Image (cartoon, grey):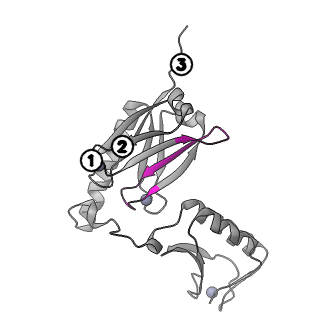
Amino acid sequence: MVLESKETTVAYRCPECGTAVYGFAGKFALHAGLVRLKCSCGGSALDLSTTRDKKLRVSVPCLYCRQNHNFTVSDGIFFGRDLFLLNCPYSGMDVGFIGKREQVDEAVKKSGEELAGLLQNLGVDGVREIQPQDMEEDEILPDPTAYDCIRFLMRDLEEEGRIDCPCHIGSGYDLRFIPGGIEIYCPECGATHPFRVDSSSSAESYLDTDSILLT
Ligand SMILES: [Zn+2]
Ligand SMILES: [Zn+2]
Ligand SMILES: [Zn+2]
């Protein structure tokens, strides 16, 4: 009898020193508690933990934002896929790599090339120059779940005709991150409405909003 190997390769690129950090996560270790994958420079760590509904929570250091992004991945995807990429919601770049060693290696290599290309296009020498520096508390970008939450609210209100702005387009509003939160804006007249978001729980509290007037 051949036992299916329940071990997967996890990798990310350290925001502090730029090294690709690799680790293995086995099913048994994971179900026993938190698994932490640390860069040897001590500047960053990827955390894996299991949620109450037996999914895996991955907290990946992001090279572009210098903060961790959280993802929830099912057991089947985590251990079953050849390659699963975790994307920075702000830059759109791949920051976390999960899967078989060979595929992960290839994806990490490709992302390194993308990064080099990006830096070259911007005419900068290192990733340091595009990272946010010494962020103040209110400059830290909100969790992507907060974005989903506000987007849900916006679509819901739009459908019921309960968002308005000076040009009264009524739909087609968009979202963007602002320091300390997220704002809805009108692409036509430029009117905005901000939401302060410090954690996903505070974004959820906006879900009872009845109507929004952009100014
Ligand atoms: Zn490092
Ligand atoms: Zn990011
Ligand atoms: Zn408008």
Respond yes or no on whether mark 1 lies under 8 Å from ligand 1. Answer: yes
Left or right, residue 43 beside residue 137 = left
Give me the disc on residue 38. 2
Count residues near mark 3 (Cα–Cα under 10 Å), then give few for <14, some for 14-19, many for 20+.
few
- Asked whether disc 2 touches disc 1, contact meaning CB atoms under 8 Å apart, the reply is no
Pointer 1: what residue? Answer: 41
Question: Does residue 83 lie above or below 212 as drawn?
Answer: above
Residue at the image point whose x is 57% and y is 32% from the top: 31
Answer with the quarter of the image where residue 194 lies.
bottom right
**Residue 196 visible (yes or no):** yes
Q: CA distance from mark 3 to mark 1?
A: 34 Å
Count residues near mark 2 (Cα–Cα under 10 Å), then give few for <14, some for 14-19, many for 20+.
some
Answer with the quarter of the image where residue 54 lies.
top right
Q: Tell me which image quadrant ligand 3 sits in.
A: bottom right
Amino acid marked by disc 2: Lys
* Secondary-structure class at tag 3: loop
- Magenta residues span 49-68
Q: Position of residue 119 (x, y in %)?
A: 26, 61
Q: CA distance from mark 2 to mark 1?
A: 8 Å
Amino acid marked by disc 3: Glu
Dividing the image into 4 quarters, which one contains the C terminus? bottom right
Q: CA distance from mark 3 to mark 2?
A: 27 Å
Q: Could you say which is closer to the camera, residue 90 or residue 49?
A: 49
Q: How many marks?
A: 3
Residue at the image point whose x is 55% and y is 31% from the top: 32
Q: Position of residue 187 (x, y in %)?
A: 57, 81
* Secondary-structure class at tag 2: strand
Q: Position of residue 38 (x, y in %)?
A: 36, 43
- Asked whether disc 3 touches disc 1, contact meaning CB atoms under 8 Å apart, the reply is no
Residue at the image point whose x is 53% and y is 31% from the top: 79
Count residues near mark 1 (Cα–Cα under 10 Å), then give few for <14, some for 14-19, many for 20+.
few
Left or right, residue 26 beside residue 160 = left
